[in-house]
Image (spheres, rainbow, N blue to C red):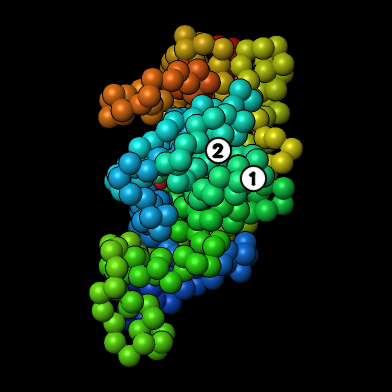
């Protein structure tokens, strides 16, 4: 492909910091680079505590444990999302109650959540699709009224805001991803964000195989041992060192992505105004972190034609999620409600190439092909 869909960006400092991590003589997790990365997020965005994890999926699994999910508990998740948003809770025995997307964008329709709440509901998982905020005031108000936990799936939402508040700092807990397809990467990687102080101590224990090792290394206890369930959720220092190089360059990375995003928007707006497709929607309460540039076509056929046309020109555009409520794994467990907006995005949404090293002239070429198509 002349223009791939994604291409992981290196800042140039990754190998330098990874070498430094090796020279520090501590390669396992929770060392110098891990602390630097965690403090970066805590200081810049105001999380009570951050813990690096080996993936966003792992961070979500920690959330399921911290929320005390028991078999039979219900968790409300949008159907238009990545498998992990639901999977992490399913592993703990939860029943997933899928919610539909909004008409205006693929985020969970907050107006429909209340009707899905039962005495068994424990958690709501807003997913900030494309890094654009869900209606968090509405969701937090519902959660408070019904005594539910809110876990933000902020995998795509780094450095994005809701009414001036950083995404991931609003719910009780949140999960970020540094997978190579995201804005800031470490190959595989993620982070748990903790906003409710009650969870900090237990989270550190779950993170380190159910032991109070973190307290031991801070000198708070004189020996460490097995205190709880958990796993090895922390990444090695080599991964944290890679991530540090990316975080140092975040401003530059975000600016370049926004420049490309704005270019797409400007060039495609005339076609959207003629009704050929819809452009990405960023509500007044949200910011855009340029994670993704998507279009919503008028039909599955039109989307198929667009992807084909782009492919003929050596440009890879891709569709996105298939509805989780009708997935092979969950369709028999789903309660049978139809989720029409979710199905529409599954059929009609297409994502255009978006990565740091994409050139403005590439964006022009891509838009030209779409125009002629
Ligand atoms: C990428 C992504 C995940 C999974 O992230 P990993 O780090 O690969 O586990 C989960 N949820 C959403 C919405 C994502 O986009």
| Residue located 72% across and 16% down the image | 273
The answer to whether residue 337 is left or right of residue 162 is: left
* Image quarter (top left, top right, bottom left or bottom right) of the N terminus: top left
Q: Nearer the viewer, residue 215 or 145?
A: 145
The image quarter containing residue 44 is bottom right
* Image quarter (top left, top right, bottom left or bottom right) of the C terminus: top right
Up/down of 342 relative to 353, above or below: above
- Structural distance between the alpha carbons of marks 1 and 2: 23 Å
How many numbered tags mark residues here?
A: 2
Percent position (x, y) of residue 90?
Answer: 32, 42
Q: Residue furthest front?
A: 119
Q: Which residue is mark 2?
A: 130
The answer to whether residue 332 is left or right of residue 20 is: left
Up/down of 114 relative to 161, above or below: above
| Residue located 70% across and 22% down the image | 269
Percent position (x, y) of residue 309?
Answer: 47, 15
Percent position (x, y) of residue 266?
Answer: 71, 28
Q: Which residue is mark 1?
A: 141
Up/down of 163 relative to 81, above or below: below
Q: Nearer the viewer, residue 334 or 70?
A: 70
Q: Residues within 10 Å of mark 1 (few under 14, many from 20)?
A: few
Q: Which type of secondary structure does the marked residue at label 1 adopt? A: helix
């Amino acid at each position: 492909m002349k223009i791939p869909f994604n291409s992981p960006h290196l800042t140039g400092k990754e190998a330098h910091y990874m070498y430094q991590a090796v020279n520090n003589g501590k390669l396992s997790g929770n060392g110098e680079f891990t602390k630097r990365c965690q403090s970066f997020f805590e200081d810049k965005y105001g999380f009570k505590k951050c813990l690096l994890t080996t993936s966003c999926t792992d961070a979500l699994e920690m959330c399921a444990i911290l929320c005390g999910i028991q078999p039979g508990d219900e968790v409300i998740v949008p159907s238009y999302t990545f498998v992990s948003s639901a999977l992490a809770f399913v592993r703990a025995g939860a029943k997933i109650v899928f919610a539909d997307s909004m008409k205006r964008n693929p985020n969970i329709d907050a107006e429909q959540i209340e009707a899905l709440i039962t005495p068994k509901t424990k958690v709501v998982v807003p997913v900030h699709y494309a890094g654009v905020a869900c209606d968090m005031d509405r969701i937090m108000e519902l959660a408070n009224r019904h005594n539910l936990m809110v876990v933000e799936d902020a995998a795509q939402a780094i450095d994005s805001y809701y009414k001036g508040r950083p995404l991931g700092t609003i719910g009780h807990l949140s999960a970020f991803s540094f997978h190579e397809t995201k804005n800031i990467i470490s190959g595989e990687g993620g982070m748990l964000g903790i906003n409710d102080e009650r969870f900090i101590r237990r989270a550190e224990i779950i993170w380190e195989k159910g032991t109070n090792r973190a307290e031991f290394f801070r000198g708070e206890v004189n020996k460490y041992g097995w205190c709880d369930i958990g796993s090895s959720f922390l990444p090695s220092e080599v991964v944290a060192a890679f991530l540090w190089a990316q975080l140092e360059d975040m401003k530059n990375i975000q600016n370049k992505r926004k420049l490309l995003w704005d270019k797409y928007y400007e060039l495609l707006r005339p076609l959207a105004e003629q009704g050929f497709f819809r452009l990405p929607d960023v509500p007044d309460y949200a910011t855009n972190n340029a994670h993704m540039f998507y279009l919503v076509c008028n039909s599955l056929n039109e989307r198929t034609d667009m992807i084909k046309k782009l492919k003929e020109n050596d440009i890879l555009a891709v569709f996105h999620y298939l509805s989780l409520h009708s997935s092979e794994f969950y369709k028999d467990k789903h309660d049978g409600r139809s989720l029409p907006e979710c199905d529409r995005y599954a059929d009609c949404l297409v994502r255009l190439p978006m990565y740091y090293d994409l050139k403005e002239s590439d964006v022009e070429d891509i838009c030209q092909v779409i125009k002629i198509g």
